[in-house]
Image (spheres, coloured by chain):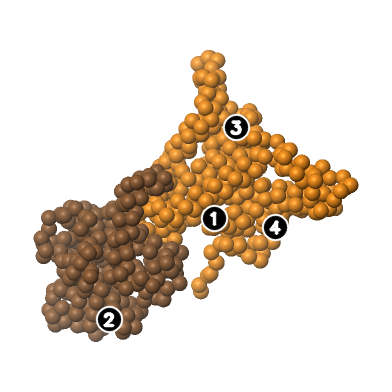
Amino acid sequence: MNQHINPGSMRADDGIEKGGMLLHVDNISLSFGGVKAISDISFDIKKGEVRAIIGPNGAGKTSMLNVINGFYHPQEGTITFRGEKRRRMRPHRAAKQGIARTFQNIALFKGMSTLDNIMTGRMTLMHSNILAQALWVGPARNEELAHREAVERIIDFLEIEHIRKTPVGRLPYGLQKRVELGRALAADPALLLLDEPMAGMNLEEKEDMSRFVMDVNQQFGTTIALIEHDMGVVMDLSDRVVVLDYGQKIGDGTPDEVRNNQKVIDAYLGVAHD
Amino acid sequence: MSPDFLNFIETVLNGLMTGVMYALVALGFVLIFKASGIFNFAQGVMALFAALTLVGLQTGQMPFSHLINATFGTDIHHWGPGLPTILAILMTMAVMIVLAFTIEKVVLKHLVNQEPIILFMATIGLAYFLEGFGDLMWGADVKPLDVGLPTGGSFWLEDVTTSWATAGSEYYGMYIDTLDVSAAIIAIILVIALTIFSQYTATGRALRAVADDHQAALSVGISLRSIWVIVWSISGFVALVAGIMWGAKSGVQFSLSLIALKALPVLILGGFTSIPGAIVGGLIIGVGEKLAEAYIGPLVGGAVENWFAYMVALAFLLFRPQGLYGEKIIERI
């Protein structure tokens, strides 16, 4: 039933084969005042994979996502997305180029309904001008309706039909997380950044969310970068894992490789840093 | 019905009309405040500037004529017989959009992520600049504005209501200014149109999104800067409508910009972030001050209208600082 959503379909094809390089970050360093959040990190994300970013609290994972989608501007290093190399991203440009994301502490539009929240996800795909919209004339109207249809399919996919019209501020935490995923999916993203999608969820909610993430990746081929603390989830879902600690990369590889990496074990078991 | 009761109704009706006019001004504030957290001190001056521009275009006045005449020793006042009202209104709207673009480019762009008080100061600067610029462009004299709306009391209503009074009583009918009636109707249409626009269009959705959460809005690809241009344009449009109404009522002159001061108590009542709040707040203030003038006025020697709104606002600040519809202020400790 889900094959109709097919994110990616509305974006121009970037010509990158599955498994080819979608994004790579090179020698990224980011500091706030004198505090280094990220030092000299490089890694890549291949098209079609689930790439996990893990590490203890304060390792710089969220900072890394913020660099990728342009909220933070690194002092050094470059970001190459779909073959285009640049020093810094700007958030709404990043969104236009197909980077969608969710947030650790849910950033939904609380006063708006589930439907409207997910509709905002399609913002970058809508092209009619403000005057045409205001007058609700032909093309603008058809566009609105077409996007509405795509959004309804996402709502079906995420099994949230019953809360379509509910203001999201009133929803329980687990459902808010799901709506936020829906908003990111609505953008037909080329790269989906998920910042702790399962944080604070109970077991059942986690299982649901894992299933959605897996379906998104396998059925639509969407590339996903994922920050998650639940190691079981990370090992199950991801193709490759990059491990950060104190703003530095300490491991990179398949889940198995990472699991047996001594540095990673030390970081997680709390061996003293010197 | 007794004449006293009919007088009461007349006072309330007049209050409602005035209230709609206040709401119109308050609406401009709310739109900008919601989308950018800026309290736009220049809203009143924007209404003045819009009205000046409209009169200027309508009467074919030469912009900057004083400046030109002083510099080149010429004596130009008009470039022609003026534009038809509709065209003049459309062109004034275009001027307000250009103004919104300029404000974003010259002022707001450089103040992203600054404290609200700094943005507020910037709008004070903007208010003084715009006031001076408006004077320079169109001259400082009081100008009548006629956009073809009917004015004066409604004889029809007077006739009808006279017969309502108890037979034999000395009652000569209700006085309602027809201009106030058309202003109220136009304001209501404007509010409905704005509501529909914000509920059912992609841009409206983007406006609401930005009002809710800046960061999330950026992450879905909304450009804050273009949203700011849009809200300032819409507020410019609201200012134009307010300028037309108040200008038609009492002439286009500097004091027009002071209607912004009357919008303050309306905002405190309605909450700075609520469009329905601005309307209800405006109506309460409008009706309240007319009733106070009529019933408390004789006891204290009149002029209640001048301070009543501010007293109500003060009471609200003490007991319900977030206003009737404003978002609740919760401080987490």
In the displayed structure, B194 sits above or below A5; it is above
In the displayed structure, A107 sits above or below B124; it is below
Q: Which residue is denoted by mark 2 in the rendering?
A: A207
Name which quarter of the figure residue A117 lies in: bottom left
Q: CA distance from mark 4 to mark 3?
A: 36 Å
Q: CA distance from mark 1 to mark 3?
A: 29 Å
Q: Are marks 4 and 1 on the same chain?
A: yes
Q: Are marks 1 and 3 on the same chain?
A: yes
Q: Which residue is denoted by mark 3 in the rendering?
A: B148
SS at badge 2: helix
Q: Nearer the viewer, mark 4 or mark 3?
A: 3
Q: Which residue is denoted by mark 4 in the rendering?
A: B312
Q: Who's orange, chain-wise? A: B
Q: Nearer the viewer, mark 4 or mark 1?
A: 1
Q: Which mark is residue B275?
A: 1
Residue at image coords 24%, 64%: A5
Which sits earlier in the primary sequence, circle 4 or circle 3?
3
The amino acid on which the numbered mark 4 sits, given as a three-letter code, is Val
Residue A70 appears anywhere in the view:
no
- The residue nearer to you, when weighing B284 against A269, is B284
Q: Quadrant of the N terminus of chain A?
A: bottom left
